[in-house]
Image (cartoon, rainbow, N blue to C red):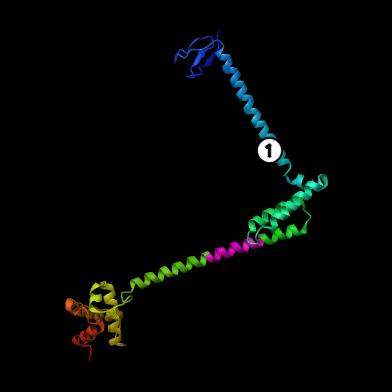
Amino acid sequence: MAKLERCPTCGNQTSENATECPACGEPLSPGWAEDIKRGTRKTNILIWGFILAVLIVWINWNGTNDDSYLRNLKETDSAEYQTRIQKLETQVAKVPASDFNENIRLYSKLQKLNPDSARYADKITHYQRKQKEAEATAKAKAEAARKAEEKAATLAAIAASKWYNGGTLHKANLASWSNSTNKTRLATSADFAAKLWEGRFSSMDELKAHARDLKICIDEVAVGPQLGSLRVTEIAASCAVLLGWAN
């Protein structure tokens, strides 16, 4: 019984004796199935050859870099040992003292080559300690910055909630007064009232009531556009008299 092989065009299972594919109609030359088999075997050989080559390279590399190999390198190949030591010493000499990770990495490599070196061990300990100190300092700074940010936000929220903060119209004219916000006018009026009635307010509510009366008075005067150049302080003094605060 003829064996089945996939059509090289559509992949349909086709008899190896067929002269054309029953699915797509592709003409099939004699021996077409054997050609496909040889091609598949060749491809498999190439793939496995590549995998084997990679495996050999990895084994060789790993064998020359594992701890036991490095520890014995001084006795087995002193020239290679000295070359590696000098290369690493040159590299680590160029690394800034502030780069703790790189110093630790290179001195760890040197220690693998020479485990008995007290200098390499001390260097690793030194940079590990410096790294921990730097991490602790960075963490403390980040925490301090976070607390400062929270405090600033809290103070800003408190300031925003205090109706009497933000008065900036003490030296302004009536035109600027009219163009300002209601909050700014009320806060400025509170400053005027507090100065005129210094020490006579029993509560902030009482101050707010007087500030509101003064603001309303100044607002009524500021309605006239022809008075826009008058100073707010002058109008506030006149309003204080009208409100009976001068007594």
Type of the residue with mark 1: Trp
Residue placed at 56% from the left, 63% from the top?
Answer: 138
Q: Position of residue 3 (x, y in %)?
A: 55, 12
Foreground residue, 226 or 102?
226
The extreme top residue here reads 1
Is residue 131 in the magenta section?
yes
Identify the image quadrant of residue 39: top right
The extreme bottom residue here reads 247
Q: Quadrant of the C terminus?
A: bottom left
Q: Position of residue 128 (x, y in %)?
A: 66, 59
Position of 58 with respect to 208 (left or right) is right
Does any portion of residue 239 appear in the rendered image? yes
Q: Which residue is mark 1?
A: 58
Residue placed at 48% from the left, 17% from the top?
Answer: 12
Q: Residues within 10 Å of mark 1 (few under 14, many from 20)?
A: few
Position of 184 with respect to 88 (left or right) is left
State the SS at label 1.
Answer: helix
Q: Which residues are magenta?
A: 128-141
Q: Main secondary structure of the magenta part?
A: helix
Identify the image quadrant of residue 121: bottom right
Is residue 195 in the magenta section?
no
